Image (cartoon, grey):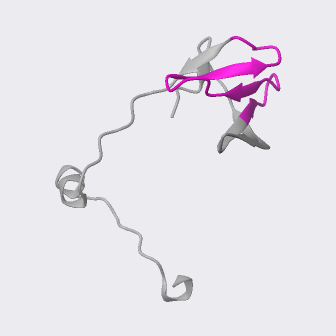
Amino acid sequence: MCTRELGGRPVQFGTSGYTKDDVFVLYDRSSNSVWYPLSDESLDAVAGARRGESIPFLDEPTPVSLGAWLDEHPGSEILLPTEDSR
């Protein structure tokens, strides 16, 4: 996951329909620049008007058990599959 902000403004990504090394190649809808993670630290513009710019990834959230989640968020609702979706 990354911040999705560049220069204080949100960047809206779309999928290009291509993959490289089993990773989706993205583009940003405002400049049509092509983005790909060149490292484990950021999403990098590899072509287009924003070439050379990077957006750093955020740390992944720490996983929690369902019990711990419900202790912290007792009003949470859990969605279960319907009989039709099984």
Residue 4 lies, in percent from the top left, at: 59, 27
- Residue furthest to the bottom in view is 83
Q: Nearer the viewer, residue 85 or 9?
A: 85
> Does residue 43 lie above or below 51 as drawn?
below
Q: Nearer the viewer, residue 29 or 39?
A: 39
Quadrant housing residue 58: top left
Q: Is residue 39 left or right of residue 53?
A: left
- 61 inside magenta stretch: no
Q: Is residue 40 left or right of residue 30?
A: left
Q: Residue at x 78, y 31 (%)?
A: 29
Q: Residue at x 25, y 59 (%)?
A: 66
Q: How many numbered markers are drawn?
A: 0
Part of the protein shown in magenta: 26-52
Q: Nearer the viewer, residue 12 or 20?
A: 20
Quadrant housing residue 31: top right
Residue 18 lies, in percent from the top left, at: 78, 42
Residue 80 lies, in percent from the top left, at: 41, 75
- Residue furthest to the front in view is 21
> Does residue 70 lie above or below 44 as drawn?
below
Residue 9 lies, in percent from the top left, at: 63, 18
Q: Residue at x 71, y 20 (%)?
A: 45
Q: Residue at x 65, y 45 (%)?
A: 22
- 45 inside magenta stretch: yes
Q: Nearer the viewer, residue 36 or 2?
A: 36
